[in-house]
C-alpha cells in the first residue's frame, strides 16, 4: 500500500432521503448519524454507503440532509472482501472518528470484510489504526498468497504495522490489510 497526500478538503453536499430512484435504503444509525446503502449492484461486486446527519437539512427540504461520509466499495482481487475504492469525509466532520465507526458499522451490519485501499492518506491510515484498536474487530495483513498476520499498531505514526514486514511503501512485496467483525 502506498502513502499519499490529500490536500483538497471535501464538501459533500446533501443527500435526498426520499429520492425517486429508490436504490438507497437506510440500514440503521450510529452516533446520531444515519447509514444509507445502495446495494443494487452488490451481485456485480459494487456497494456504496453514505452516512448522513439528519440534524442538518437543506433549506425548506427536510428530506435533504447533510452528507457526512461517502464510501465506494468493490470486490477486486479478493472476492471475499470489499475493497475500499474511495472514502470522502466532509471537512466539517473531520477529527471525530466517523470513518472508523462507519467501517465498523458496515462490517457488523452487512456482515462483510473490508479491504484497505491500495493508496492511503494520513487520515486513511489513522482509520485503520483506529479499527485495529477496536476489540470487537480483527484486522490483519497478508500478501497475495501469504498467510494472514494480525496487525500491530504504531502509536507514533498512528498506523498499522507488522513486526517484520513493511505494510506501507514496500518496494519488495505488496501487502493487503483487511478487517472483519
Image (tube, rainbow, N blue to C red):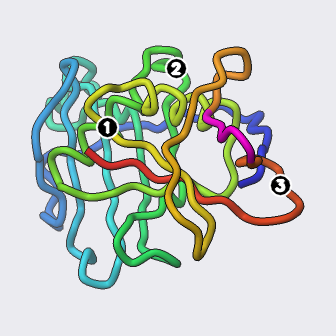
In the figure, is residue 69 to the left or right of 166? left
Q: Name the residue at 59% across, 37% down.
A: 124
Nearest-to-viewer mark from 2 and 1? 1
Which residue is at the front of the view, 90 or 20? 90
Residue 14 image position (x, y, % from top left): 35, 38
Residue that carries the numbered disc 3 in the rendered image: 170
Residue 69 image position (x, y, % from top left): 40, 37
Residue that carries the numbered disc 2 in the rendered image: 94
Residue that carries the numbered disc 1 in the rendered image: 137
Residue 143 image position (x, y, % from top left): 62, 66
Q: Looking at the image, how many numbered discs can be counted on the residues?
A: 3
The C terminus: image quadrant: top left
Q: Secondary structure at mark 1?
A: loop
Which residue is at the front of the view, 142 or 97? 142
Q: Name the residue at 44% across, 43% down.
A: 139
Label 2 or label 1, whichever comes before in sequence order: 2
Q: CA separation, marks 2 and 1?
A: 23 Å
Q: Badge 1 local density, few (<14 within 10 Å), some, or many (20+)?
A: some
Q: What span is in magenta?
A: 160-164
Classify residue 98 by image quadrant: top left
Amino acid at each position: 500500500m502506498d502513502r499519499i497526500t490529500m490536500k483538497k478538503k471535501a464538501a459533500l453536499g446533501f443527500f435526498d432521503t426520499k429520492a425517486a430512484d429508490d436504490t438507497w435504503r437506510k440500514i440503521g444509525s450510529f452516533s446520531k448519524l444515519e447509514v444509507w446503502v445502495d446495494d443494487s449492484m452488490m451481485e456485480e461486486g459494487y456497494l456504496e454507503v453514505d452516512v448522513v446527519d439528519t440534524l442538518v437539512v437543506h433549506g425548506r427540504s427536510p428530506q435533504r440532509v447533510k452528507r457526512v461520509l461517502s464510501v465506494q466499495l468493490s470486490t477486486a482481487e479478493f472476492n471475499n472482501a470489499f475493497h475500499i475504492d474511495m472514502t470522502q469525509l466532509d471537512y466539517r466532520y473531520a477529527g471525530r472518528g466517523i470513518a472508523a465507526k462507519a467501517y465498523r458499522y458496515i462490517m457488523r451490519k452487512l456482515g462483510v470484510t473490508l479491504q484497505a485501499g491500495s493508496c492511503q492518506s494520513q487520515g486513511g491510515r489513522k482509520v485503520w489504526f483506529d479499527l485495529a484498536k477496536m476489540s470487537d474487530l480483527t484486522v490483519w495483513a497478508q500478501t497475495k498468497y501469504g498467510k494472514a498476520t494480525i496487525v500491530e499498531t504504531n502509536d507514533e505514526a498512528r498506523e498499522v504495522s507488522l513486526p517484520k514486514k513493511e505494510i506501507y511503501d514496500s518496494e519488495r512485496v505488496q501487502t493487503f490489510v483487511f478487517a472483519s467483525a
